[in-house]
Amino acid sequence: MNTAALRAKKKPVPKMKAPPMKSYIDLVEQTFEFPEELKVKKNELLFNGVPLMDIIREYGTPLKLTYLPKISEHIQYAKEIFNAAIKKFDYQGTYTYCYCTKSSHFRFVLEEALSNDIHIETSSAYDIPIVRALEKAGKLSKDRYIVCNGYKRPLYTQHICELLNDGFRNCVPVLDNMKELDAYESVNVPVQVGIRVAADEEPNFEFYTSRLGIRYSDITEFYKQRIQDNPKYSLKMLHFFINTGVKDTAYYWSELSRFVYKYCELKKICPELDSIDIGGGFPIQTSLTFEYDYEYMAEQVIENIQWICEKNNVPVPNIFTEFGSFTVGESGAVIYSILDQKLQNDKELWYMIDGSFITQLPDSWGMNQKFIMLAVNNWDNPYHKVNLGGLTCDSLDYYNSEAHISEVFLPQIEENEDLYIGFFHTGAYQESLGGYGGIQHCLIPAPKHVIIDRDENGDITTQLFASEQSSDSMLEILGYK
């Protein structure tokens, strides 16, 4: 080979110029379809039109926030789709929306929900003083339905008896077991009761049959022996709930059909039975890839119930639902700031937050629940893979995957650059499961809580519901003061 040919062979190949690194906004917008309530403006995130950086500048972090209009929006939407389905199929029953109080007991949540002409479902003796407080404040009239669920200890049944005797005529104790009926003998007015059916859970559930409710095989005989000829009681309602919620699966439709067939069987001997409660279970969006056709599911519920009733020649029942997470879940968010970034083992990058997943988002820790997680600012920065670490000394206080992928990506930040992140649709259960205002792991304080609303002109209003938990309050609980 001559020298010229050798030089030509060894001539370096021109290097391709690497494309510029994508920004965080490119990653999100090109990968996902954004929920309507989340928008980016000038590289900062808006939640339901609320500029989150404005909230952070005013209140600091960590903070929980509740956007009240979202609660009303969800209630009105559920009413709309169920009533539209009733009209579409000429269904001769009514629809009643109940709020499941255990999802969030805060007064501002209950008052917002009740402003939409709804009813409530309780699960504990300590729900009843809340009912009393709301009635005293003029937020809950005595003719609202109060569906009392759960396994009831004496204080709970005592409170129910007092409600009934005080004129709460639509308080409906749902019997969880056959002996519970004895607890209402002291009531001096007729009592409408419900019966909770012990439904079968999915076969992969740890316990196949629910611990709650009365077995299918016992219900009819129990009604005949204890309720049918007793002028004190009338069977108003059958109650149905399964842990998986309302899903378009063969399992769900099979269990719902089995339940409706039991209603038809009882209706033929129990004319006063006019309602079924199909529980809660409408899901909320916890991922940017969430898909669920609410309208279709409402139509299918109505159509299936009607078809079975017509087949059995019985009148269709009025339908109650008890939506908890669906009512309040998407109204909530938790905002953190990134305190520090640490490179561990020369490969694992950790962003340390100014809070704790274990204490402030317990579902993410105890149930591996995922929420929508996004940066609040710096959307024009390049992104990289990170792990999120909480403040406790527990090795499980971390968050390192999303529902749609097994990783977390966030904007890169320089040493003196601030970054804030938000977890969205966290409004259900987190405060009660985390023991709001109590003693938390490593004495991590409960964060401040901000309520966001809109006035009659649609302008944003905010108020501090609670400051960050103080050390004095912890010392008092622990007996030091």
Image (cartoon, helix red, strand yellow):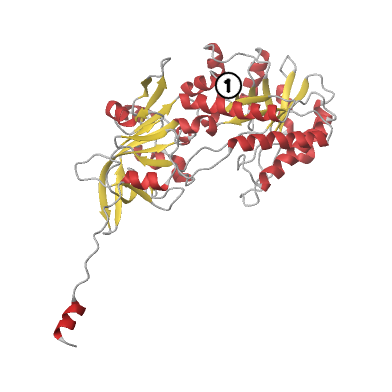
Q: Is residue 313 left or right of residue 111?
A: right
Percent position (x, y) of residue 318? 72, 26
Q: Quadrant of the C terminus?
A: top left
Percent position (x, y) of residue 175? 70, 30
Residue located at (48% from left, 21% from top): 107
Percent position (x, y) of residue 34? 43, 40
Q: Is residue 114 left or right of residue 64?
A: right
Residue located at (75% from left, 41% from top): 258
Does residue 54 lie above or below 6 as drawn? above
Q: Is residue 11 left or right of residue 222?
A: left
For residue 128, which quarter of the picture?
top right
For residue 76, which quarter of the picture?
top right
Residue located at (41% from left, 31% from top): 438
Does residue 381 lie above or below 9 as drawn? above
Q: Circle 1 is placed at which residue position?
A: 128
| Residue 389 in sight here | no
Q: Quadrant of the N terminus?
A: bottom left
Which of the pair 414/120 is nearer the observer?
414
Q: Is residue 341 left or right of residue 120?
A: left
Q: Secondary structure at mark 1?
A: helix
Percent position (x, y) of residue 345? 28, 59
Amino acid type at image mark 1: Ile
Which of the pair 143/462 is nearer the observer?
462
Which of the pair 337/413 is nearer the observer?
413
